[in-house]
Each structure stands twice: as structure tokens, then as C-alpha cells.
Image (cartoon, coloured by chain):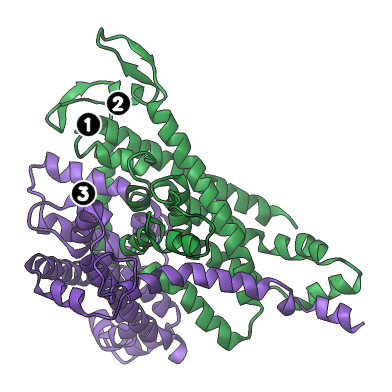
Amino acid sequence: MTPARRRTFFNFWLIGPAALAIIIFMVIPLAMMAWISIQSRSYGGGVHWGELSAEAWLRFLFERNLDDSLSWSVTYTVIIIRSIWLSLITTVLSLLVGFPTAFFMATRDRKWRTLLVFMVTLPFWTNLLVRNYAWILILRDYGTANGLLMWLGITDQPLPLLHNQFAVAVGLTYSFLPFMVLPIYSSLEKLDLRLVEAGFDLYASRWQVLRNIIIPLAIPGIIAGSILVFIPALGSYVTPELLGGGKTLMIGNLIGHQFGAARNWPFGAALGLFLLALVLLAMTVYALRGRERGGKP
Amino acid sequence: MSARRAAGDARRWPGLGFAAAVFFAYVYLPIFILVILSFNENRIVTIWTGFSLEWYRMAFANDDILRAAGNSLLIASVAATSATVLATLAAVRMATTRFFGQTGMNALLALPITVPEIVPAVATLMFFASLGVTLGLGTVMIAHTVFCIPFAYLPIRARLEGMDPKLGEAAADLFANPRQAFFKVTLPLLMPGILSGFVLAFIISLDDFVTTFFVGGAGSTTLPIYIFGLVRTGVTPEVNAISALMLLVSIALVSLSLFLGRSEHRY
């Protein structure tokens, strides 16, 4: 082998294994999922290979009656809209809680900032299941929150805090909050505080300074953070499963159920692809927004 | 004048400190509540009656829990080791020269953290089941290895970015062949990044629920799967004890990883 060819060979063996592992055990399964979504269902689980069928995709909007005719059904549309709605609420809540925190962090001394960033990141590395379980302890009928409310005399019987959309929104916000704080922090960190002072010297009010100076500078971080919160919230499985109970399903749970009791692979595959498409859409919007901003002077 | 100046100082805006305090309370209080309740002697978990280590003793005496913990550690060790080896090789390649298709390769390496976990989890389940592979420890190890790659890759890549490329050139000037240069120069310098990546991959595998739940089968019950099964049937004090232990292990490991990855600019 020539040295150049030997180098190519060497390089291929370096990157090859990681790429191959991801291609074989993630890309190919995802491609296979697309194929499975248009196969006809086998009722024992699995599919009848080669028997094409659009049944799984029709199921998004229709249900099949006993006489084999189709009629409109909102069962799954409701779940999809609820997933998007809960993810949007989660994103807004994260922004409301995260923005002031990121601003607070960015205006501290360097020594403090490192510690604060560590404290924001730390929960992300702890078990998601356990963190959501902690909310069961807090929100259930005789949990910490109700105990506190009753002790304070605000209510004399437990409020239903668990197994509803409220619990899911709280849990999702809790799960993905660091993803909002860190990007906003990193764009605000570069903020020159003299700009804020200049704004005040020109008799701007706090609100005007916030709206005209600080928020525009934080926009890239806000968009990045929103995407980073929205995407995992949309695909979440653990939080709605634990905190939502049976009535507050999201797409992730619906997908999961197709591989459990429902045994409907094609529908599960179609839902999975649909979720993937939503995620790609969100990322494309983000990429386009980024390019648009980059183009501005 | 002084009032205006105080208003101009963004560090002292009213409500900022309060908002941050609310944020950190929101993030940390649930964790503290869980840990405190795990030491509660009362079986009706929420009411505090006294300090007790009873639930920890019960957890450690429970064979199912010990077996699940063993599985978790075995899977995490295998997956983190394989992912770190693959990620190290890939990171070295990605950092040395530019090549055709590099952007695509970056996207491929990041794929496992870009898509919501449930989608590849069920896709991998269908993949293995269609091939007739029995779901169990083996399939879980493979799936974990794949999604651990990006977590191992990023710290190694960051470490490489901070390294002086002249070091490799110097090795070549001293007649080291690429293999010698890699093993004698690059790898030792890269070690903190590799260890940091390994620990992150280890935590991610240890904490994983969704992929294990779908790709696993009989004999691959890990701690998160075990906890999930118990939580669905009801809250028990043993769950609090194992959960609190898992939190502490993760916190200890991530602190270790950050400590290892910290000395980035030494070279």
C-alpha cells in the first residue's frame, strides 16, 4: 500500500466502527420502521411482511367499523394535539422560570457562575425516572404539597394534583429546565452591562431596557433553549406515564402501548415516524431562523 | 442620581435573586424531599415520625434489587467501555483532518441524542424481534452502546480541540509512525477526556429507562426497570431508599467526570 492509501485505510478503521454501530443499530432500524408502517398488521404482534397496507396511517384520523367502513375518529388526534399543547406549555413555563435565572447567573462574578452552571447541570445527570417519582411523593393525595396546603388551612381535603395535565406539565418542566437555562445563560453571559447602563442614562425604564436591549441579545439562546425543551418534551414517555396516569397520554406513551398490550406494530411505527417528522420540522424551523438572523447586519 | 445608578446596575434588579431562589428550590427541593423521606421510619411515607435506616437495610436484603443492581452495573460497564472505544477512535479521526462527508458524519454521531429516545427504542425492538434475536441482556448492551456514543464522544472531542496539533507533528518529526504517535503521544494526553467521556456514558447507561424497557426482556431487569414496576403499583419506602441511592451515585459520578474533564487547558 502507498502511504496515502495506508492513511485512508487507517482513517476508515478509526471512524468506521462508531459510524457502523450507529448505522446498523439505529439508522437501519429507523428505516425498517418506515417499511413496517406500511405493512399489514399481524394480530399476535409483528407484521405480515410484503402485504402492503395503509391501515396504520389511516388510523390517525379514522376508525374502522365492524362493517369495514371508515369513520372519522378523534381519539388519536386528541392525543397528538395534547402532546403538542403540553410541550408548548412546558416550553413557556421553562422560559418564564429559566430566563430570570439565566439573567441572574450571567450577572454574577465568574467564580459564582461556574458553581451556578454546575448546580443547573447536576440534576440533568440524575435519574429521570427517580426525579419524576419524587413528584409523585409531592403531588399525591396525602403527599407533601397537599400536606402543606392542609396544614396551612388552605384546603381541608386533598386536592387532586396528580394524574392530570397539571402534573405532567410540572414534571416535564422539571425534567427539561436545564436545557432552557444554559443556552440563554450563554448568550446573556456575553452581554456588556454597560449597554444596560447606557440605556438607563438615556432615561429608559427597566421594562424598556429589558425589551429593547436584553431580550434581543438573548434571542438566539431563547430559540435554542425552546427547541431543546420542546423536542424531548414532545417525545417524553416517563413523565406522562408516571404523573399523567391513564387519562393524560402523550404520543410517546401511545407509541409504547402499540408494543405492549395493543400489539400493533404498523401503527406504532407510523406514530414513531410522525414524531420523528415533528422533531425534524422543529429543528428545520430553528435552522432557518438561525440563518435568517445570521443574514441580518 | 444614585437611585438611577442603582437601577442601571442590572445585577441588583429587584426580583432577580428571588427568581433564582425559586428556580433552585424547584430544581432541588423534590430531590431533598425524596432523600429525607427515604430515612423516614413511618411506612405511610409522607408523615415524618423519626429517623430510620430500615428501608435501606430492606433494600440491601432484597435479592431482586441486588440482581437488578448487578444487571445495571454490568450493562453500564459493557456499554460505556464499547462506546468509549468507538468514540475515541472516531474523535481522533474527526479532529485530525477534514474530509468529504464530515458534516454528515457529525450529524450521524449526534443522531442518538437528537431523536426522542422512544423512537429508536421501539425501532430497535422491531429490528431485533424481526431478526429473531431474543431480547435480553445482549440486546440491551448493544442499544446502550449506540446511544452512549455521543455522550462519550463530546468530552473526548472537546479535549482534542484543546490539544496542540504540533505535538503530533513533533512525534512525526522524531520518526514515530502514526500508530506510535497515537499510542505514545495522543492517547496519554487524551486520557482525562476519555475518562470523562467514559463516566458520562456510564451514568447515562445506568440511568436509562426507556431503551431498556423496550429492548430488554427476561433477565435484563435493571434498577430503573425494577423501580418503575414498583412505582406503578404504589409508593413503598424501599423505592425511596433505592431511588435516593441512585441519585447519590449519579451525583458522585458526574462530579467525578467534571473534575476529570476540568484540566482542559493544561496543554
Residue at the (29%, 48%) spot, across then down: B120
* Label 2 or label 1, whichever comes before in sequence order: 2
Kindly identify the amino acid type of the residue bearing the numbered disc 2: Ala
Q: Is residue A82 visible?
A: yes
> Mark 2 and 1 residues: CB-CB less than 8 Å, in contact?
yes
* Chain identifier matching the purple colour in the rendered picture: B
Which is more toward the observer, B8 or A214? B8
Q: Quadrant of the N terminus of chain B?
A: bottom right
Residue at the (39%, 36%) spot, across then down: A274
In the picture of the structure, the residue carrying the numbered disc 1 is A264
Where is residue B248? Give x, y as percent.
Answer: 30, 77
Q: Which mark is residue B214?
A: 3
Where is residue B172? Give x, y as percent.
Answer: 33, 86
Where is residue A166? Give x, y as percent.
Answer: 48, 49
Kindly identify the amino acid type of the residue bearing the numbered disc 3: Phe
Q: Quadrant of the C terminus of chain B?
A: bottom left
Query: Mark 2 or mark 1, which is nearer to you?
Result: 1
Q: Could you say whether the residue bearing mark 2 is in a helix, strand or loop?
A: helix
Q: Chain of mark 1?
A: A
In the picture of the structure, the residue carrying the numbered disc 2 is A56
Label 2 vs label 1: CA separation? 9 Å
Q: Is A35 located above or below residue A4 in the figure?
A: above
Residue at the (52%, 72%) spot, across then down: B24
Q: Is residue B202 visible?
A: no
* Chain identifier matching the green colour in the rendered picture: A
Q: Could you say whether the residue bearing mark 3 is in a helix, strand or loop?
A: helix
Which is more toward the observer, A85 or B35? B35
Q: Are marks 2 and 3 on the same chain?
A: no
Residue at the (32%, 40%) spot, across then down: A246
Label 1 vs label 3: CA separation? 14 Å
